[in-house]
């Protein structure tokens, strides 16, 4: 009798024989920009003849494309499964952290209170963004109602506006590694609030996952520990 681990190794060994095919991945902004390039590079090294296409949009758009069969796999954050979807992987953890510009009055502080946060302008992603959905859910549960918000439709725009002093924002820890290292932004903890989520890989129910998709999931599983070290 073979073990589950042996079965998994045999499946991966079989997939290593892939010589041709295609794969369309849809990804939310955060995983698509800050995480998947490393996974795709590892995948293409192993399967150079697989034609891979990556579509990046907010999670709401990607979820719809999964349901419509326009992408083979969708990678989104903090996902609640909708009709016609199934989760095929949910192993990578993310955290949304509060950032300020280095000239902000909070920049030298480690913590702020909930009331202080409520009184500050909060820069937020657009409707349909998983980052926004997860953040709003956590703030509501914590009883925090921002007095002023400003909506932007890209994480990079939010970071630039934070650095320009237009407000503070919750963003993925993966999205601000470089800015924190260069001390362009400061991470501030909010007392009694921590926002975590998983990145989920979703697939349309009723559709078979191609061999290239199974191979991609195997590579993603192998790369996950290295990606986690980037946080």
Image (cartoon, helix red, strand yellow):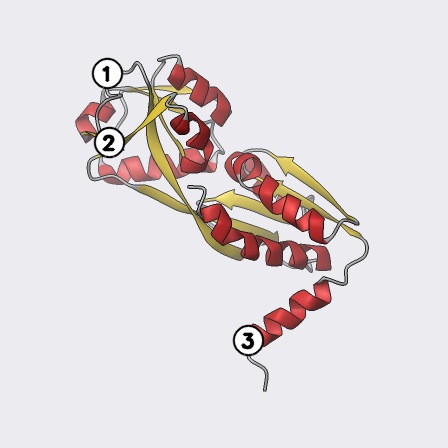
Q: Is residue 86 visible?
A: no
User: Looking at the rendering, which quadrant does residue 160 occupy?
Assistant: top left
In the image: residue 19, left or right of residue 76:
right
In the picture, the disc for residue 66 is none
User: 10 Å neighbourhood of mark 1: few (<14), some, or many (≥20)?
Assistant: few
Name the secondary structure under disc 3.
helix
**Lower sequence index among marks 2 and 1:** 1
Image quarter of the C terminus: top left
Q: Is residue 112 above or below residue 133?
A: above
In the image: residue 88, left or right of residue 120:
right
Residue drawn at x 23%, y 25% is 118
User: Looking at the rendering, which quadrant does residue 110 occupy?
Assistant: top left
| Residue of label 3 | 4
Name the secondary structure under disc 1.
loop
In the image: residue 103, left or right of residue 124:
left
Residue drawn at x 56%, y 34% is 33
Residue drawn at x 40%, y 29% is 181
Name the secondary structure under disc 2.
loop
User: 10 Å neighbourhood of mark 2: few (<14), some, or many (≥20)?
Assistant: some
| Residue of label 2 | 144
Q: 229 or 114: nearer the eye?
A: 229
Spatial separation of the CA atoms under disc 3 and disc 2: 46 Å
Q: 69 or 36: nearer the eye?
A: 36
Residue 25 position, x and y percent, is 65, 44
| Residue of label 1 | 105
Residue 121 position, x and y percent, is 31, 18
């Amino acid at each position: 009798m073979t073990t589950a681990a042996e079965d998994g190794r045999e499946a991966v060994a079989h997939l290593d024989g892939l010589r041709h095919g295609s794969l369309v991945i849809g990804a939310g902004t955060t995983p698509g920009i800050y995480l998947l390039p490393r996974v795709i590079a590892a995948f293409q090294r192993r399967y150079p003849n697989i034609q891979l296409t990556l579509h990046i949009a907010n999670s709401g758009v990607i979820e719809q494309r999964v349901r419509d069969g326009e992408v083979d796999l969708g990678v989104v954050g903090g996902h609640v499964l909708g009709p016609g979807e199934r989760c095929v992987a949910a192993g990578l953890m993310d955290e949304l952290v509060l950032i300020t510009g280095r000239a902000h009055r909070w920049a030298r502080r480690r913590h702020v209170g909930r009331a202080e946060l409520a009184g500050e302008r909060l820069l937020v992603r657009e409707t349909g963004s998983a980052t926004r959905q997860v953040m709003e859910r956590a703030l509501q549960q914590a009883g925090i109602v921002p007095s002023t918000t400003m909506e932007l439709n890209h994480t990079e725009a939010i970071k630039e506006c934070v650095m320009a002093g237009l407000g503070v924002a919750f963003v993925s820890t993966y999205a601000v590694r470089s800015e924190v290292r260069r001390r362009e932004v400061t991470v501030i903890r909010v007392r009694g609030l921590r926002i975590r989520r998983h990145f989920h890989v979703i697939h349309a129910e009723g559709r078979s996952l191609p061999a290239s998709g199974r191979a991609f999931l195997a590579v993603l599983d192998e790369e996950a520990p290295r990606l986690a070290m980037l946080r």
